[in-house]
Image: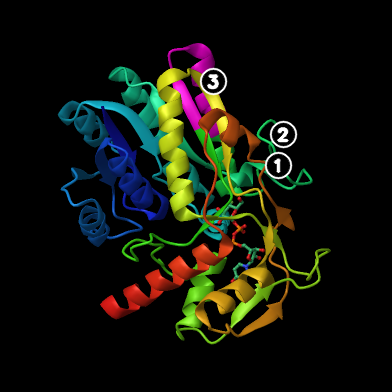
Amino acid sequence: MTVLITGGLGFIGSHTVVDLIEQGYDCVILDNLSRTTIDVLEKIELIVQRKIPFMKVNMLESQALRNVFTQYDITSVIHFAGFKSVGESVQNPLVYYQTNLISTLNLIDIMQEFDVKKLVFSSSATVYGDLHIPPLREDLPLKALNPYGRTKLILEEILCDLVSSDNSWSIALMRYFNPIGAHKTGLLGELPFGIPNNLMPHLLKVAIGETSKLQIFGGDYDTEDGSCIRDFIHIMDLASGHVRALDYLKKNAGCEAFNLGTGIGYSVLKLIDTFKEVTGIKVPFEIANRREGDIVVSIADVTKAETLLGWKAKYNLSDMCEDAWNWELNRKRGE
Ligand code: UFG
């Protein structure tokens, strides 16, 4: 029972590997190290107190990917590898289509060849587009707003087509809301590559003094305090959702989408407030123009994950802020 985790040294992948090992699974990690570093492997091994097989593989190279399946007795796959920046995808759509689509096609082709038919796929709440009033349920119509979102949407459709053509496949599509926080040990968290796009990495840079001010994109939305609302979820909760999905796939065939969120929305300004309450740090900010493409409110309906996976987020916004800050301090000390 060995699980292959592609992108296993990334933010979500690394936390999921730790959870899988703690739940008794054997893992093989695959990563091309383009958006992370090999130190993450050492940190994972430190937490779980054992060596974990790792292969540096570019998933666009089929033969290299096939070698992983030849070398290890893989029985299921959690596929995280891929690019995830909305802005970058608008600037370089072809790189996104090539990387996210071709690598996944190579993966499912080789899985088929080796008769490995259980897959947990890293999707995103971005597939809901701007069509609906939250809370967002998995059976709503979907829409892509940018090339990144389109890669997720296309891949969800491809994977469901695959299941329709061969019902021995079991696939779970995990739609993430806004993962933040870090591992409780402070050893794993989100590594900033280039200029951070997301809110929490920006906030941490300001809190640690590397940037002077946080820009809040839009203060005049039709919300309680004028800033956008998101369903922030602790990265450790997100990780455990994947382990539950894998357990679910052992007993259930088909292609099912699952939201991973808390079901609770907090505004951007509320996050900054909570960060101050928890850490004592007042993050300087200014209200800037709205960011193009932002949706105003994004909140998950988490009934399906609760009912079918028996999973529910257990950490709150304060935990997310505390653990993110602890990670940032540790990272800074290690520099
Ligand atoms: N924000 C700021 N200032 C910043 C960064 C972000 O005010 O410096 C605001 C954004 O405008 C937004 C909120 O903080 O209102 C959250 O922004 P993020 O970039 O952290 O996250 P998004 O909700 O835009 O995007 C996330 C994922 C995407 C995914 C999307 C939809 O990063 O991959 O959710 O599910 F597509």
Residue 111 appears anywhere in the view: yes
Label 3: few (<14), some (14–19) or many (≥20) C-alpha neighbours in 10 Å: few
Residue 197 appears anywhere in the view: no
Q: Amino acid at mark 2?
A: Leu
Estimate the spatial distance between the alpha carbons at disc 2 and disc 3, rounded to whole Å: 18 Å
- Find disc 2 in the rendering and name its residue: 140
Residue name at image x 38 percent, y 27 percent:
108
Element marked by disc 3: helix
Residue name at image x 65 percent, y 43 percent:
144
Checking the image for residue 136, the label placed there is: 1
- Find disc 3 in the rendering and name its residue: 161
Q: Which is more foreground, mark 1 or mark 2?
A: 1
Label 2: few (<14), some (14–19) or many (≥20) C-alpha neighbours in 10 Å: few
Residue 175 lies in the magenta-colored region: no
Q: Which x, y percent locates residue 242?
A: 44, 39
Residue contact between numbered discs 1 and 2, judged by CB atoms under 8 Å: yes
Q: Which residues are magenta?
A: 155-172
The picture quadrant where one finds residue 23 is top left
Element marked by disc 2: loop
Residue name at image x 31 percent, y 25 percent:
110
Estimate the spatial distance between the alpha carbons at disc 1 and disc 2, rounded to whole Å: 7 Å
Estimate the spatial distance between the alpha carbons at disc 3 and disc 1, rounded to whole Å: 23 Å
